[in-house]
Image (cartoon, rainbow, N blue to C red):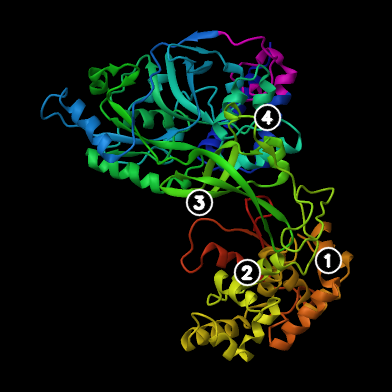
């Protein structure tokens, strides 16, 4: 038998790791570094290898792995896992309330809880004496499939509930609100507890995951929900472990030893026991307050890090919910107030081609007009020609479109079942539609390029880009197009010669004295922009605001940058070989050298306001910062720019290097 001190140490490590998992994956508020966490986990693994008889199914080391199963066993739920009726307007929510209030005794106080309707895969989690013993899909609401092994790979799912949750619930992690209930949640870990939740993939991780899968040549699902469902229904749990799955819980299906009578208390109990619970919840005193809360989140749905298709309005009193009963498979005591649609289907009529400032040719879908989220959509993004081929999107297809962040619509894919046989493949253009130059495609990239730097389409986009980065607010996109059609602008440097062409400007339609004065004043003011802003505005591949700042800090002047070798460029931390080569190629082009001469003659600032990094250390040199939250006198962008201007580095996450 193992030494009692070894047993005690193993249990202590497990409890510490569970607590830190909760802090990291549920609260997003870690209190130890990654290295310290890894040390705890490595010690536990070593001890369990030394004493395999002490390994338990709920140990943190047992999340990943397990042999593939031949099929999923069927699981009968202890109570029906019901769906929800839907409402698509505030009036429909009020009509729901009018129907059920007739069944409620007059004078009964009724409050409501509002929660996100998470668009994931419903899961039912069973605990015996605080240990996770079974997880299942919803199935038909009565019988689901046993996916216990796959669910154990989700790091935010507690494998063991705390015998004493006081250390967790005392850190302010319960939902805030009125009349916060207090209960002895320890009673929930001494018997049987069944919890309902939603497995999903965070939006912040989905795009990176899709890219990774595409590069590996593996199947890509159209949306996070399908990806999560596909991962959890894999017979091999190692596949589920490789997916960025997460979990949110919102309901107690069954609880031995404790009667919880309010939904608001359910959320508090779940969070106190270490379950992840959505923070976008509210306790409301009236239906109108609940409607207002739901409509607020409809406007701010982009703040969710998960797909949500509405907000659920529930009667807080669970006993009252029970008395109201069920209609079909929908409980009377709750309703889903759905968000306006962000997906629709329509026909792909044509593919237009836009050219970017670097020559990339971007396919754009021309659609039969369709309403989506209150907006008429006629065009949508098609990403690139590899994406078109992979999804097998064809001209004439009925396609599914989606609005990304309620702003940019894109084509998700074709509705293959509606094909007639008349659809035609979409091929990359052999020549640039703007200048007729044969297109090129680099072996290491998916993009199709127009290589002609004098291409009229490219020049228009370059001028647009320059105007935006240099903050010439009086020179908008339509004005740029007009000036280029009139022959007054041929490249970005020509913007600064407009002051000598006042009469020609006044001759243009819509240009009066005041408009010309404002235009020229805005152009003149842009000459004061710092060197890093000018570098970013030139449109050099891979040189955005951050890289431009690094270059300006290091070299101090445009002359020094133009004379730099590829080796010197690569020696700057944050500049890779591809960026260094792009900078060398751009400044090595005689046409661009001539452009710089014109900008110098126009009076733009081609030197930095401060000494270069080669001239001496800046006050924040060698320090790395993370900017988060809100600041009293800076926006985040301004704070990052200030740090970089004084030699510091800005990182997106806390690490050992963070000052």
As drawn, the label of residue 242 is: 4
Instruction: Determine crowd level at label 4: few under 14, some 14-19, many 20+ residues with C-alpha closer than 10 A.
Output: few
As drawn, the label of residue 614 is: none
Query: CB under 8 Å between callouts 2 and 3?
Result: no
Report the residue marked by disc 2: 464
Which numbered mark, 2 or 1, is in the foreground of this view? 2
Find the magenta span and give its range: 47-73
Which numbered mark, 4 or 3, is in the foreground of this view? 3
Which numbered mark, 3 or 1, is in the foreground of this view? 3
Query: CB under 8 Å between callouts 4 and 3?
Result: no
Query: How far, Cα to Cα, is label 2 from label 1?
Result: 28 Å
Residue 178 visible here: no
* Image-quadrant location for residue 601: bottom right
As drawn, the label of residue 407 is: 3
| Residue positioned 68% across, 41% down in the render | 388
Report the residue marked by disc 1: 569
Relative to the observer, which residue lies in front, 619 or 381?
A: 381
Residue 574 visible here: yes
Instruction: Determine crowd level at label 2: few under 14, some 14-19, many 20+ residues with C-alpha closer than 10 A.
Output: many
Instruction: Determine crowd level at label 3: few under 14, some 14-19, many 20+ residues with C-alpha closer than 10 A.
Output: few
Q: Earlier in the sequence, mark 2 or mark 1?
A: 2
């Amino acid at each position: 038998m193992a030494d009692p001190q070894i047993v005690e140490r193993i249990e202590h490590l497990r409890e510490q790791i569970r607590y830190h998992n909760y802090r990291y994956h549920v609260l997003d508020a870690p209190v130890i570094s990654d290295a310290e966490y890894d040390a705890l986990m490595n010690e536990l693994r070593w001890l369990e290898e030394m004493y395999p008889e002490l390994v338990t199914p709920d140990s943190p080391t047992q999340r990943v792995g397990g042999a593939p199963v031949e099929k999923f066993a069927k699981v009968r739920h202890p109570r029906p896992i019901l769906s929800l009726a839907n409402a698509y307007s505030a009036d429909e929510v009020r009509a729901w309330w009018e129907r059920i209030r007739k069944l409620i005794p007059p004078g009964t106080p009724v409050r409501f809880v509002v929660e996100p309707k998470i668009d994931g895969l419903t899961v039912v989690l069973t605990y015996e004496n605080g240990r996770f013993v079974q997880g299942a899909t919803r199935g038909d609401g009565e019988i689901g499939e046993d996916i216990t092994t796959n669910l154990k790979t989700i790091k935010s799912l507690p494998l063991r509930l705390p015998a004493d949750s006081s250390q967790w619930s005392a850190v302010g992690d319960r939902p805030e609100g009125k009349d916060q209930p207090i209960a002895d949640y320890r009673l929930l870990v001494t018997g049987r507890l069944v919890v309902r939740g939603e497995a999903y993939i965070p939006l912040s991780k989905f795009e990176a995951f899709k890219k990774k899968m595409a590069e590996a040549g593996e199947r890509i699902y159209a949306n996070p929900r399908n990806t999560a469902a596909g991962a959890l229904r894999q017979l091999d749990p190692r596949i589920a472990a490789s997916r960025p799955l997460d979990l949110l819980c919102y309901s107690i299906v069954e609880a031995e030893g404790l009667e919880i009578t309010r939904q608001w208390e359910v959320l508090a109990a779940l969070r106190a026991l270490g379950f992840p619970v959505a923070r976008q919840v509210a306790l409301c005193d009236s239906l109108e307050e609940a409607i207002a809360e739901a409509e607020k989140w409809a406007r701010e749905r982009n703040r969710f890090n998960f797909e949500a298709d509405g907000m659920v309005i529930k009667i807080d009193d669970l006993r009252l919910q029970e008395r109201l009963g069920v209609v079909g498979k929908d409980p009377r005591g709750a309703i889903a107030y759905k968000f306006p649609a962000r997906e629709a289907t329509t026909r792909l009529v044509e593919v237009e081609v836009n050219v970017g400032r670097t020559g990339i040719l971007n396919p754009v879908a021309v659609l039969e007009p369709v309403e989506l989220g209150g907006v008429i959509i006629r065009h949508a993004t098609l990403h690139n020609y590899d994406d078109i081929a992979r999804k097998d999107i064809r001209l004439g297809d009925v396609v599914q479109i989606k609005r990304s962040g309620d702003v940019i619509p894109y084509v998700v894919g074709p509705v293959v079942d509606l094909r007639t046989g008349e659809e035609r493949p979409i091929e990359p253009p052999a020549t640039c539609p703007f200048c007729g130059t044969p297109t090129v495609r680099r072996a290491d990239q998916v993009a199709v390029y127009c290589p002609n730097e004098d291409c009229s389409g490219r020049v228009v986009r370059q001028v647009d880009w320059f105007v935006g980065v240099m903050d010439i607010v009086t020179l908008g996109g339509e004005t740029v197009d007009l000036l280029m059609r009139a022959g007054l602008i041929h490249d970005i440097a020509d913007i600064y010669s407009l002051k000598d062409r006042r009469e020609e400007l006044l001759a243009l339609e819509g240009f009066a004295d005041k408009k010309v004065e404002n235009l020229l004043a805005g152009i003149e003011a842009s000459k004061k922009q710092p060197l890093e802003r000018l570098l970013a505005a030139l449109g050099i591949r891979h040189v955005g605001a951050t890289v431009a700042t690094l270059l300006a800090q290091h070299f101090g002047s445009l002359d020094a940058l133009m004379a730099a070798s590829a080796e010197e460029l690569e020696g700057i931390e944050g500049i890779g070989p591809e960026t260094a080569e792009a900078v060398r190629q751009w400044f090595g082009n005689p046409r661009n050298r001539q452009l710089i001469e014109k900008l110098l003659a126009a009076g733009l600032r081609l030197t930095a306001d401060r000494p270069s990094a080669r001239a001496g250390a800046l006050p924040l040199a060698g320090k790395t910062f993370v900017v988060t939250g809100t600041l009293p006198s800076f926006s985040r962008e301004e704070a990052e720019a200030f740090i970089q201007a004084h030699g510091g580095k800005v990182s997106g996450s806390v690490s050992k290097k963070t000052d």
